[in-house]
Amino acid sequence: FEYGTYVAAGLAYLLLRQQDAVGLALFDDRVRSFINPSSNPSHLQALLGEIEGSSLKEKTNVGSIFHEFADRIKRKGLILIVSDLFDDAEHLKRGLKHLRYKNHEVVVFHILDEDELTFPFRRMSLFEGLEGLPELLANPQALREAYLVELNTYLADVRKVCRDTHID
């Protein structure tokens, strides 16, 4: 999450420097904050203030949020998505297709931690539940193989959804 906020802030800075209009939407299970696009250089302070004040709250509902954005953003433009994209692949696909149907150019920055990708844990660990899930005390060696199979299947599904919808 923290890395994602840095990516969003950096992209906002770069786009405003080239005088493009930049807006911001922060969401979890619903849109928590929406700042309309502007190309005014002072707009960066509003964007950074909103990003800095953001935090993880609820379970995300990415697919539904993308439907809302598709209906809410009237002018076609470039939509940069910075997210872990954790949602059902079919739900995600429908939301992304809706954005593309509205003629938006969409670029996804799929943010995952290295530990999520490699699952390097070796000793009995207490895994913190995210997005409403409880904590789990487990032997990671017993989970590693099945976890990596599930994760890689999910990542392949996300790549396919993006490829099929012409999203970078």
Image (spheres, rainbow, N blue to C red):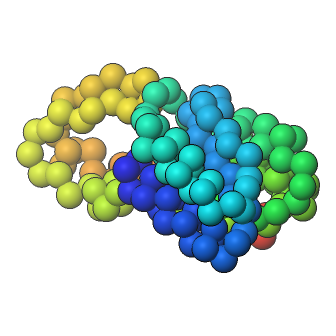
In the depicted structure, whether residue 62 falls above or below residue 14: above
Q: How many marks?
A: 0
Location of residue 96 with respect to 114 vertically, above or below? above
Does 130 appear above or below 117?
Answer: above
With 33 as the anchor, is 123 left or right in this view?
A: left
The one nearer the camera, 46 or 73, is 46
Q: Please provide percent x and percent y for residue 56.
A: 43, 34
Q: Who's the residue at 42% across and 58% down the image?
A: 6
Which residue ends up furthest to the bottom in the rendered image? Answer: 18
Closer to us: 99 or 76: 76
Q: Quadrant of the C terminus?
A: bottom right
Q: Position of residue 150 (x, y in %)?
A: 45, 51
- Residue displayed at 39% across by 56% down: 3
Outermost residue toward the left in this view: 123
Q: Can residue 157 be seen? A: no
Tell me if residue 34 can be seen.
yes
Question: In screen coordinates, is 24 left or right of 165?
Answer: left
Most foreground residue, 152 or 86 = 86
Residue 85, image x, y percentages? 56, 49
Residue drawn at (12%, 51%) of the image: 122
Asked whether 135 or 167 is in front, the reply is: 167
Image coords of residue 160 (percent x, y):
67, 64
At 89% from the left and 55% from the top, the residue drawn is 75
